Amino acid sequence: MSNEWPHDPDGEEGSEGMRKYGMAILAKKLDEDEGFPLKAADFVAEHGDEPIRLNSKRVVSVADIFEHVTEGEFEDIVSFHKAVGNAMRAGGFWEFHPKAGESNVKHA
C-alpha cells in the first residue's frame, strides 16, 4: 500500500483483519450512541487523511468523499449515512452494482 496513507486500509487498523469497503469503513469511525450530533468539519478534521477502500484497486481519502457532502451537521447515524451515501454517489465513489432484477434505488 502507498506510504501516503497513515495506515494500510487492509491492515488491522483499516479493516480489522478483513477487507472492508466504502461506507463500512466510514461507519466504523462513529460512535452511534455518543458521537451525535456530529459536525462534518469535525469528522474531516479527525479522519480526513485516512484511506477508504472503494474496491479492490481504488482507495480514496475521507476528505475526498466529504468534498461532496453538503450537510454541515448530522443529527444521528441515519442522517450521516444518507448524506455520505449521496456524496459518494455524487462524487463517483459509490461502488455498489445491483444484481439483475434489483432496483438501483436503495432507501436508507
Image (cartoon, helix red, strand yellow):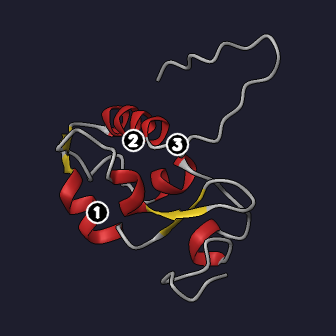
- Dot 2 crowding, Cα within 10 Å, few <14, some 14–19, many 20+: many
Along the line of sight, which residue is nearer the eye, 65 or 44? 65
Between discs 1 and 3, the one toward the N terminus:
1
Q: In the shown orientation, is residue 99 left or right of residue 2?
A: right
Q: Amino acid at mark 1?
A: Val
Along the line of sight, which residue is nearer the eye, 66 or 12? 66
Query: Which residue sits at x=47%, y=50%?
Result: 27
Along the line of sight, which residue is nearer the eye, 79 or 49? 49
**What is the quadrant of the N terminus in the image?**
bottom right
From the viewer's perspective, is the residue at label 1 or at label 3 nearer? 3
Identify the element where label 2 is drawn: helix
Identify the element where label 3 is drawn: loop
Identify the element where label 1 is drawn: helix
Is residue 65 positioned above or below 18 on the image? Answer: above
Q: Which residue is mark 2?
A: 84
Query: Which residue sits at x=45%, y=43%?
Result: 91
Q: Which residue is mark 1?
A: 44
Q: Which residue is mark 3?
A: 92
Between discs 2 and 1, the one toward the N terminus:
1
Measured in 3D between alpha carbons, the distance from the residue under mark 1 to the one under mark 3, in whole angstroms, is 19 Å
- Dot 3 crowding, Cα within 10 Å, few <14, some 14–19, many 20+: few
